[in-house]
Amino acid sequence: MKQIVMLLALLLTVPAHVSADDEATLVQIHTRDGKSHVGELISTNSTETKLFDIELESEITVAKQDISKMANPFGEIAAARALGLPAFFAWKIRQLPARQSAVGKVAKLSQATIYFTLNKDQVKVGQQLDVYRHEGEIIDPDTGKILAVERPRIARIEVTEVANAFSKGKLVGELETVLQVGDEVERPGNGERRIAVCPIPLQNGQLSNLGLEMSEDLTTRLVNSGTKVVERSALDEVLTELVAQNTIFFEPKEAQRIGEMTGATHVVVGKIVQKRKLGTAYVRLVDVTSGEIRVAVSASISLANAQILSDATGRMSKSTSGSSSTKIAVSTTDNEFDYLAKSRALPKYLTTASSLEKTAKGVRFLGFPKHYDFEAGIIKTRIRDFIDRNFVFEVLVTFGPDDGVTHIGIGSGRQDGSANRRAESVFVRFHSPHHGDGGVSQLGWQKPEVTFGHVREPGVHLLRMTKEGNTLVFEVDPEHDGPTADDFETVIPDLSAYAPYLHAKNSVLFIGGTGTIVATRLTVKP
């Protein structure tokens, strides 16, 4: 009897998620205080259950005495419904093992052509590949153990022709080393995922607030888990072209085209099928190289609060009279500030593909050094045609002792050559009181910088951007104390002449830099 009890105890402590194919076992736990946890079971015994909570993205332990109900196993369809499709889909993506692309070798060299051992199923014409060369092993002189293999990248080639057993290419880029037979050829970033998350439209191609929130939530979860995600701006041209061709995004071969044109290794595509006030969201992760569907998830959703925002490219819907209209959640009258520390998500009129850190005061971009990278992040509006709108956009910002600047502006928001330049944008650069003498400057793409004020005291400061007709005004209210003598502003009387590059697809409102963003408020005027 004692042996049976010991055997049962042993079985109870074996991690339940381990199986013959090493797939995770999902469970749902209801606790006596009314909470619910869905996650990957780690272990369970007579006193406690451990699981990786998918929503919290952390391991938790629940005492047996606190569990009122436990579903083990818990089905994937039920899990997607309980967690919401973005959280569940992001978790499924993280479960995928890294997949290495095929590695070929240089087989022959002619005067202008490189022959290599990757076939038409592995590479495509126009694709760029990296060439590596083994230059010997690094060996510990004391133990004789191989520590690493020296394998530098020596060149980049572009595929010019593909065949059943081999392909041809030519040298491109700056690394034009003399190649040798036996050099290895593979895709850049081999084994690294870079995911493009497409908008999730309704079945008729229109974009709703629900589909937009779903794709943005998925993007945020992937970024925060360390997955590289293609910026939405990089998708715009591709999506516009596909919509013009009446292409169905849901098809794997179209997902492959999106991946090839954006540099993504995988593409998330989906659609929402309507049935009265209910619907089903279908989302797929497509491998760009093979066209294989790696993850497919569906979940029932309510469409009771669905609002049509735009077509699948992000263009705003037009009313029958032809005027621009949208039901996105911004006010047409005075509204309250949205304080970012009080919510788990950004206000619905804002989005980001950047990693954010929440603090007691607000949110900030993760990683100060990232500020100096050309890929430094921004928070931006979902609406992209503010060049055609009248609006007031306000941001409350505060600075720590190591912070440099905050940017607020209109345009693409892309960095252009340095941390303080943004391509196709008009913006204000607000120096922290600890740096740059607290100077506040107006900048335009390929325009000289103009300093129009200083903020030398700490505190929470208000930046306001107002557009009426073709006039754009930037205002600064130091310490956010209302209209006082220390406020200052700069006026661009003719925005179209000052920034002729702004148009209905690149004129988002954006925030960037290294300060803490305390609150935002957006008022779109009739």
Image (spheres, helix red, strand yellow):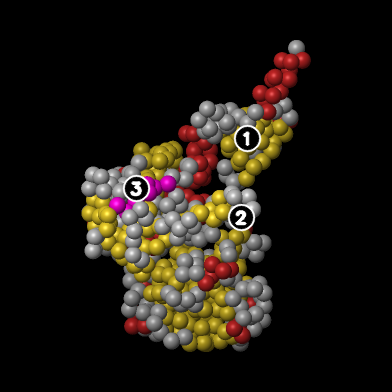
Query: Which quarter shows the C terminus?
Result: bottom left
- Tell me the mark number nearer the camera, choosing from 3 and 1: 3
Disc 2, SS: loop
Q: Establish if 179 lies above or below 251.
A: below
The CA span between labels 3 and 1 is 34 Å
Query: For the point 67% across and 30% down, which residue is it?
Result: 44
Mark closer to the observer (1, 2): 2
Image quadrant in which the N terminus is located: top right
Which residue does the numbered mark 3 point to in the structure image? Answer: 289
Say which quarter of the image contains residue 401: bottom right
In front of the other: 403 or 152: 152
- What is the magenta range? 100-107
The residue at the point 61 percent across, 40 percent down is 52
Instruction: Point out which mark residue 141 bears.
Output: 2
Rendering coords of residue 37 (x, y %): 61, 38
Crowd rating for badge 2 (residues with CA inside 10 Å; few <14, some 14–19, many 20+):
few
* Amino acid carrying mark 3 in the image: Thr
**x then y, percent, for residue 301:** 44, 41
The answer to whether any part of residue 519 appears in the image is: no
